[in-house]
Amino acid sequence: MPPRSGWGAQRLAFASTTGKVGGEAMIPGQGTALKARPVQQVSHGISVPLQRPASNSQGGSRRLAPLLGFAAGAVAATTRRAAPATSTLPAEKVQNLIQENEVIMFSKTTCPFCSKAKEVLQSTGSKFVVVELDELPEQEGAAMQDLFAEMTGARTVPRIFVRGQCVGGCDDLLALQQDGTLQKALQSKSFQIKVSEEEWRNKLDPRQYRILRQQGTEPPGSHAYDRFMPAKGYFACGACGLPLYSASSKFRSSCGWPVFKTCYYSKDAGGCHVGTVSEFGGLEIVCNRCASHLGHVFFDSFKPDNPNGERH
């Protein structure tokens, strides 16, 4: 095993045994059509089967106070700690809200579809949080709806998220209720873990924390896993230990960092073990269990065994 230093050792940990997961997949909805097994998709954008914890015994909704301090631009959220309201941008605030709340609905007070969706969620006995966009400054609400269009394929409200995954709008929620999927989804076990930033600081050394939780990067060519090409085994998240990439998915590159063409997926994860966050025209990749920063994905490495051209 190579020494634990550099990008690979901070963001990834290598295990010589084979990870027991469902398989491998490419990032859905990017580049060419998937050749590996794709993540399941629903009506609005990319989604996966929801894995839910037991619902609370008493249902109900909680409205958040108007969220002030958004700017017109957007950045990716890198930690679960919200930035001060005066500097928080829409994408960061939305990502933090989605991560911090098991069930959250972005709504408008005058929308009949939003009212119906609230009734459906209340009927399940689950607690949920509501953010009313029409109680925000107009520019801020519009920026958030533009973000929903990018994230989910639709900018309309309601936009409902359950444990970090968008389940769609009112019609989607009604369909899930009618076929019995909604109640089951709300009661199933969670795959994601929630760890406070204070706990991460105690668990990770300063270098790991800077990279995994604050989007840090080290110089190219300085990483122990850059040229490390194991015959078997897997690479796991350096923060929570989730298996992310098989040894066989790693390929040689001159970029100076370890690169991979496919990521693990599993039923427990509800899809891919690696998630993506739109960021300044690119795609940040994060651990789908703990939301730690892993790097970025590019689509410039096309080969017969990599038809999507993915370079993680």
Image (spheres, grey):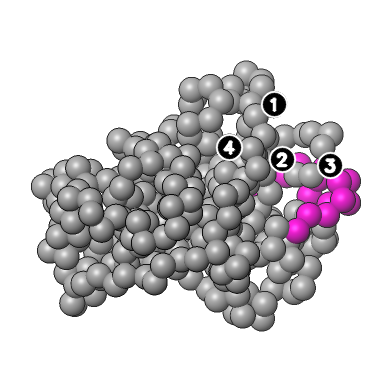
Distance, label 1 to label 3, CA atoms, is 15 Å
List the residue tagged with mark 3. Answer: 256
Residue 279 pos. (x, y %): 62, 45
Is residue 290 visible in the rendered image? The answer is no
Which numbered disc, 1 or 2, marks the residue that appears first in the sequence? Answer: 2
Tag 1: amino acid? Ser
The quadrant in which the C terminus is found is: top right
Residue 30 pos. (x, y %): 53, 30
* SS majority, magenta: loop
List the residue tagged with mark 4. Answer: 262
Which numbered disc, 1 or 3, marks the residue that appears first in the sequence? Answer: 3
Tag 4: amino acid? Thr
Q: In the shown orientation, is residue 17 left or right of residue 137?
A: right
Q: Which residues are magenta?
A: 216-235
Q: Residue at x 60, y 48 (%)?
A: 73
The reply to whether discs 2 and 4 touch (Cβ–Cβ < 8 Å) is: no
Q: Residue at x 30, y 35 (%)?
A: 43
Q: Which mark is residue 301?
A: 1
List the residue tagged with mark 2. Answer: 259
Residue 33 pos. (x, y %): 48, 22
Disc 4, SS: loop
The reply to whether discs 1 and 2 touch (Cβ–Cβ < 8 Å) is: yes
Q: Residue at x 56, y 69 (%)?
A: 85
Q: Is residue 219 magenta?
A: yes
Disc 2, SS: strand
From this view, report whether residue 277 is shown above or below residue 77.
Answer: above
Choose between 254 and 299: the one closer to the eye: 299
Distance, label 1 to label 2, CA atoms, is 10 Å
Distance, label 2 to label 4, CA atoms, is 10 Å
Quadrant location of residue 197?
bottom right
